[in-house]
Structures are given as C-alpha cells and as structure tokens.
Amino acid sequence: MSRSIPLNESAVEVFTRSFEGVNRVLVLGGTGWFGRTALAMLKHLDVKTHIVASNPREFSVDGAPLLAKGWDLAEIARFEPDVVLDFAYLTVNKAGPLGLEQYSRVNRQLSEQLYFASSLPSTRRVITVSSGASIRLPRGMQGQLAAEAYALGKQAIEAQLATISSEKEISVGIARAWSVSGGHVQNPRDYALSGMILDGLEDGLISVHSNHLVYRRYSAVEELLALATHASESPGLSHVDSGGHLVELEELAGLVSAAILGSKVLASESVRESSNVDSYFSDSAAWDEETERSGLRPLTLEGQIEHVVSALTG
C-alpha cells in the first residue's frame, strides 16, 4: 500500500471535529489537489461520500481505492448529502487548451452543479474553495482575459452562495486560497513553491523567475479547509482567506534550499525591481481569527516545505 502523504495533524483534528453528526458528504471535483486533501481527511470519519469529477475514473488517495463518478443530477439528489464540499472549477491554465469560450462555458456548468447541490432539501452546509483572485489578481495575471474570466466566475459563485445561504438558511463556508502548499498537489510545476522544490530535487538549482519583488503568505491546504469547515458550523455565510508568514520569493527559495540537501539558490542575473511589487496575499486577519477560534496550530513555512518535499520524493 502507498504511504500516506503528510498532513498537519492539527488541521485533520479540526476538520474531522467539524463533521460530527454528518452522515453523507458530496465531494465535487474530488480528484484534484483540494479534493484529494479533503478525502484524505474524510477517511478518518464514518461518513458516506459521493465523489464527482469531470473525468469519471477509479483513483486512489493514500493507497485507498476510490471511485469518481460523472455528474448525474438524479443520482446526486437520491444521495441526499448533508454537506457539500466543492472543489470543481477549472484553473486559469486550462483556458489555453480549451479556448476562452469553452473554458468559461465549462466553469459556468460546474457552478450550476454547485448551486443545484447547495439547494437540495437535504443540504445543510456547503464548503467551497474560492480564490484571492476574487479580490484582486496577481500582478502577472492582470489584463489576461482568462484570468479575468476566472476571477469574475469566482465572484459570481460567492455572490450566488450568499443568496442561497440566506434564502435556504444553510451554512456556507468560503475558503479563499491565495497561496497554498500541500503534498496532494497535482501539477507541481504550475505553482511557485512546489516548482522550486522540484528544481531542488531534480538538479539542485533553485531559481526565482521574476525580475521584481514578489510577496506571498503560504498556508497548507488542509489548514484552509479545516478553518472554512469549522467556520461553516456557524449559521449563515463565512469567509476564510488563507494567511501565514509573509515571505518574498528569494527568501522562500532559501528555505527550500535549506530543506533539500545539496541544493542551492541561483543568484539573480540582475537586481530585482522594488517598484511595482507583486503583493498577492490577504491581510491574514480572518485567518488569524479563525485559527484562534478553532484551536488550529498551523505549520510553519519550513514545516509546509518539509511536507511537500516528503510527498514529492515518496
């Protein structure tokens, strides 16, 4: 059996505690990074799950075989979920292969599926993953049509779920991911932190691919899901933005190098600009408040890096 990908045990405890009294969980987008992380935590609970994916297939999480089914409105209604976990939304990098029109159409369809599941008579709680892009885009994505379509779609989902929460009197927890880490990442080259780790593991040379300063806050995916799930125990609509220690990419590269024996950070060929700084991160206020309220003990950035290194070398 495959070994388990490491998770923050404190986050697992907060997440599972928040599912007391839950019997049936519908997982939309269960085969991606966030879906797999949630399923790895749900395995600790005696709950029935119905997993939906755009590409129905057998897959595994931590060696446990699972089945993702296609969207079937009648089957999902018969399942009668108590809780809906929603991770079904195409990221910006899928717009190129699909074309902007098809990309937007698919995301609208996924949104409609979420609204249907949220409006089922049995559904009492919904936890969905949004993005910091719903607040503002990262500097490098500003002006890109696909990124703007992504951000507008996320804004529309947040607004519609607020309406559903009010009209149906259900609890909705929105987890806004700004910058996150985790060993269940599916396309590590698409993300700065896991991309750096792969560079360090593969050739020992870690580069910062930016000619200007870039600041981020990182938190583990399981921590963000745990806090949003905990917040959703309260009535109404709640938002939790990912937070964490503020770090510039060159400092992040140094921390990655320190975690990978024999690796080093390549010096920048030119001085990185301090004007037009890319500051894509939350103020961490909601994160800090919900962390204290839930009792979560977040991983340090070094701990997050250690988990991802372990997952990518397993």
Image (cartoon, helix red, strand yellow):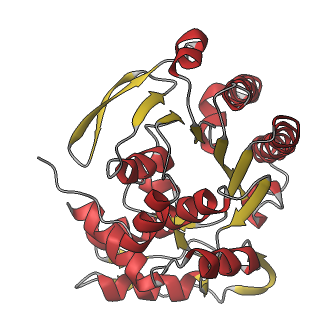
**Closest to the observer, 207 or 244:** 244
Q: Is residue 286 left or right of residue 135?
A: left
Report whether residue 176 is seen. no
- The answer to whether 167 is drawn above or below residue 266 in the figure is above
Report whether residue 24 is seen. yes
**Closest to the observer, 106 or 93:** 106
- The answer to whether 101 is drawn above or below residue 248 in the figure is above
Q: Residue at x 23, y 41 (%)?
A: 64
- Residue 283 % position (x, y): 77, 79
Instruction: Name the outermost residue toward the left.
Output: 1
- The answer to whether 157 is drawn above or below residue 180 in the figure is above
**Closest to the observer, 239 or 248:** 239
Residue 176 figure quarter:
bottom right
- Residue 236 % position (x, y): 80, 52
Which quarter of the figure is the C terminus placed in? bottom left
Q: Is residue 180 left or right of residue 116?
A: left
Q: Residue at x 75, y 29 (%)?
A: 104
Q: Residue at x 59, y 38 (%)?
A: 84
- Residue 81 % position (x, y): 55, 30
- Residue 248 % position (x, y): 61, 85
- The answer to whether 144 is drawn above or below residue 49 in the figure is below
